[in-house]
Each structure stands twice: as C-alpha cells, then as structure tokens.
Amino acid sequence: RKEVEQDPGPFNVPEGATVAFNCTYSNSASQSFFWYRQDCRKEPKLLMSVYSSGNEDGRFTAQLNRASQYISLLIRDSKLSDSATYLCAVRNYGQNFVFGPGTRLSVLP
Amino acid sequence: DADVTQTPRNRITKTGKRIMLECSQTKGHDRMYWYRQDPGLGLRLIYYSFDVKDINKGEISDGYSVSRQAQAKFSLSLESAIPNQTALYFCATAALRDEQFFGPGTRLTVL
C-alpha cells in the first residue's frame, strides 16, 4: 500500500460544478498537509496548506481528518483554468515530504 | 527571477553517458530535494539534503548520486545513464516546517 493515495481520476466536470478530491495517508505521525496543483509538464505549485480546523481560500476548501487520516479538497464553481492535476502531500516527522500520485481534473465548457 | 532554477531544462543523452543536473535556489532554504516524476507514478524522492554536510538517500537512489556544493546548490548525477531513467526531474527546497518549492524541472531522455 502506498503511503499517500488519491482518487485515481480523471475527473471531467462542467464549468460551474463542485468537485471534491480525497487523499488518504498511512503514517499517523505525519505532521503537515498540503495540496499542490500541477499543470501539464510544469512544476507542482502550492495551492494551499491544510490545517486541522479546515481552511478556505476563495473557491477552495481544504479539510483534514486526523482520526481517519484523510485530507480533502473541494473546488466550488469550477473554472476552465482549474484544469490541472492535484497532488496531495504530507510532511513527516523526518521533514520528508511524500506525494500522492495526483488526480487529474478537466473542466469542460 | 525564479527562486529555484534547474539546468538544463531539456537533455537527450545516450545510454552509458554521465550526466549532471544542477539546481540553484535563492530562497535561503537549508533543505533541498531531488525527485523524479513518471506518468502514473507521481513524484518519487531520489535524494535529499538538510544542510551542506547532510546527504540522505530517498526512495529510489540506485543509479544516482548527489553533491551539495553550497547551501544554494544541489546537483544530481547519473553516472551511467540508462533508458529507464528517462523522466521529468524536479529539484525542490523547503524551510523548516514549511512547504516545498519546486524548480521548473528537467526533462531527461536517455536513448
């Protein structure tokens, strides 16, 4: 079993739809959690950190459930420009980061 | 100017050749990482370094070596390249308890 797993995707949704991504991690000692966005052939870029109380940034909402060891990302009112691959990442006690395989999103006109 | 730079951005080489990928950062971070990314496999850690005198193997270090020449520079070498090392390579940096910042990537093809 991989340390970080994500919905396999791809997700194809119409503009304006709400889409949710899920990510599970196996290391209960994981300390920090992140969502990255990666455009095709580009580097991953931080979308948002995920805090224990949950956090929101505009149309994006991230949630963390430590007891169940999963992270979620919700995108509301999706735009064409949201099309990308979304990677979840965890930072472990040893300061290493482990990334999930990513879930590709295509927002269709 | 980019905070994390990688050179070269694209490289085609032949089996058995030695190749070096270079990474420089201006963020002042102590922690530097090398990953490779393959379709369907996500990002896999090759080596990481927490300071100039600290080098650690990652998940897939076989066939690779690294050098941390300075706080700002971290190089990845393939001593004898083989075709299954064809991939997209990313360098990343991080500060303590902070997220990672990635370079633009190097697309390596080994023929």
Image (cartoon, coloured by chain):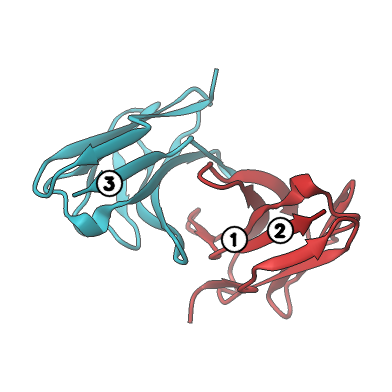
Chain colours: A red, B cyan
> In x, y percent, where is residue A33?
66, 58
> In x, y percent, where is residue B85?
26, 54
Q: Amino acid at mark 1?
A: Val
Disc 2 is placed on an element classified as: strand
Q: Residues within 10 Å of mark 2 (few under 14, many from 20)?
A: many
Residue at image coords 78%, 57%: A108
Q: As drawn, which residue projects farthest toward the front?
A: A109
Q: Taking the image as drawn, is residue A19 in sight?
A: yes
Label 1 and label 2: CA atoms lie apart by 24 Å
- Is B59 located above or below residue A49 in the figure? below
> In x, y percent, where is residue B4?
48, 29
**Towards the viewer: B27 or B38:** B38
Q: Which residue is mark 3?
A: B109
**Towards the viewer: A52 or B64:** B64
Q: Residues within 10 Å of mark 3 (few under 14, many from 20)?
A: some
Q: Which mark is residue A90?
A: 1
Location of residue B54 (image quadrant): top left
Q: Amino acid at mark 2?
A: Ser
